[in-house]
Image (tube, coloured by chain):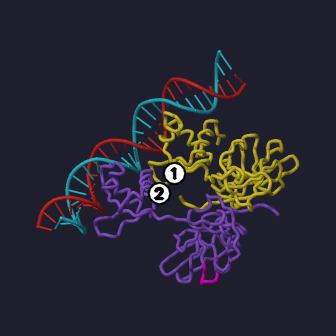
Chain colours: A yellow, B purple, C cyan, D red
Amino acid sequence: MNVLTRRQREIFNYLRDNNDSFTCPPSLDELCVRLGMASRGSLYKHIMALINAGLVEPFTGNKKAGVRLTAPAQQDNESPEQGLPFIGAIAAGKPIEALSNIAYMNVPDALKTDKPCYVLQVKGDSMIDAGIFDGDWVVIEQRDYAKNGEIVVALIEGSDATLKYLEQRVGQVLLLPANTTMAALSYRPEQVEIQGVLVGQMRSYRTH
Amino acid sequence: MNVLTRRQREIFNYLRDNNDSFTCPPSLDELCVRLGMASRGSLYKHIMALINAGLVEPFTGNKKAGVRLTAPAQQDNESPEQGLPFIGAIAAGKPIEALSNIAYMNVPDALKTDKPCYVLQVKGDSMIDAGIFDGDWVVIEQRDYAKNGEIVVALIEGSDATLKYLEQRVGQVLLLPANTTMAALSYRPEQVEIQGVLVGQMRSYRTH
DNA sequence: AGAAAAAGAGAACAAAAAGAAAACAATTGA
DNA sequence: TCAATTGTTTTCTTTTTGTTCTCTTTTTCT
């Protein structure tokens, strides 16, 4: 999974900022007009990238006339003062771009700390035995260190970000999944960069 | 029940916004004129979808001169400061109404519905295999009915409230834990009162 | 400058949704 | 009673929409 390109971010920002102006989830054609584009196919690629990144979700109500966009990113359109930045999805992704303030999610105090925090959506089942499921949101305290046993967001060799248990040993860093079918990953310390520590978790059971 | 299509939503929005301009509930033909449509049959399908979705109701005054539309029902449920009431813990407890010490918890929109919701804290491991752990908070939509397979707050014989999978059969209600070491509970329907349905979940990893 | 990546245009396709038109049945009102 | 109106159903055509291609243009990076 790649990091968003500039254009993809532009399009997402447009969706976030103009969400209110859509009476109903916009179709690709409608979005083309809004964005001044002439081709659905081009926009389609960008939208798929956003869906893949977990920033946007397809409109699953109808079968065909509608892989459309819902509100960007399970948004709470909260002000940045109160909400936490929702950055995107994490699985085998790319470094987290803390700069692009994307959407904001209104997180209860009990799920965050007094340090800077952000929200990610979990992709995959690597932490399923820890009760962290595909599609859950996690609240991450931004930190570049952690204690053994904590669940961390780790960036591996500058390219892949993942959510795992941390186990640091001399000259070795283990990233342990909580899934009996998956193997632990072993790296040298310089290969792994800690980007944050899990402090909260959320799940929605709604079926839209 | 299906999600509305774009056109259905448009038509609903028109009815909601122009309700005042109808001296009496409009007929399909009248609505066709307003909406610039040429066929009753086409509009009929949309209206039926809205009725099916509960957004509109047929006019039952006269028998024939009108399956017409009334104003859509409005739901308004403001809770203090937009937070959800935090009711207390649930395990083998008391009826939820008995707990009066109400605090309010700030819950992200993605974890609640547009119906009345409240928050409980989970005690025990009866739902551990569903990724719901001891100490988690759950967001419950207040409802007295549920579908099979949903996770519900059920009050047993007026005294014990518990969080379980619901399985309703003829003359029998099963409450299934998500824990391989625990047995299912079987009751007669009149013994079980559904108090709500799980729609969201939260966990804190903070160590105080 | 040149290669690679990203963005865009445009066409084509299948399926879904929307619409038109006609016919029918039930009710109302004169 | 008769004519008009209204809801209802059915059949058909048109439009919309997501999706997938190929090709060209623009941007980015070395």
Residue appearing at x 80%, y 42% in the figure: A191
Magenta stretch encompasses residue B157: yes
Question: Is residue B3 or residue A92 the one in the foreground?
Answer: B3
Side (left or right) of B77 relative to D2: right
Q: Name the one closer to the observer, B167 or B24.
A: B24
Disc 1, disc 2: CB below 8 Å?
Answer: yes
Q: Tell me which chain the residue with mark 2 is part of.
A: B
Residue in the foreground of this view, choosing between B11 and B96:
B11
Q: Position of residue B131 (x, y in %)?
A: 66, 64
Q: Position of residue B137 (x, y in %)?
A: 69, 67
Q: Is residue C30 above or below residue A90?
A: below
Q: Give the number of the disc on residue A59.
A: 1
Which residues make up the magenta segment?
Answer: B155-161
Q: Is residue A114 above or below residue B54?
A: above
Q: Residue under mark 1: which chain is it in?
A: A
Graded by Cα atoms within 10 Å as few (under 14), some (14 to 19) or many (20 or more), the crowding at tag 2 reads some
Dividing the image into 4 quarters, which one contains the N terminus of chain B? bottom left
Q: Which residue is mark 2?
A: B3
Amino acid type, callout 2: Val
Instruction: For residue A95, say whether it is visible.
Output: no
Same subunit under labels 1 and 2?
no
> What's the residue type where badge 1 is placed?
Phe
At 36% from the left and 50% from the top, the residue drawn is B35
Identify the secondary structure beneath mark 1: loop
The mark found on residue A127 in the picture is none
Query: Which residue is at the front of the view, B20 or A42?
Result: B20
Could you say which quadrant of the image residue A155 lies in?
top right
Is A12 drawn above or below residue A122 in the view shown? above
- Locate residue B166, reporting x and y percent: 56, 72
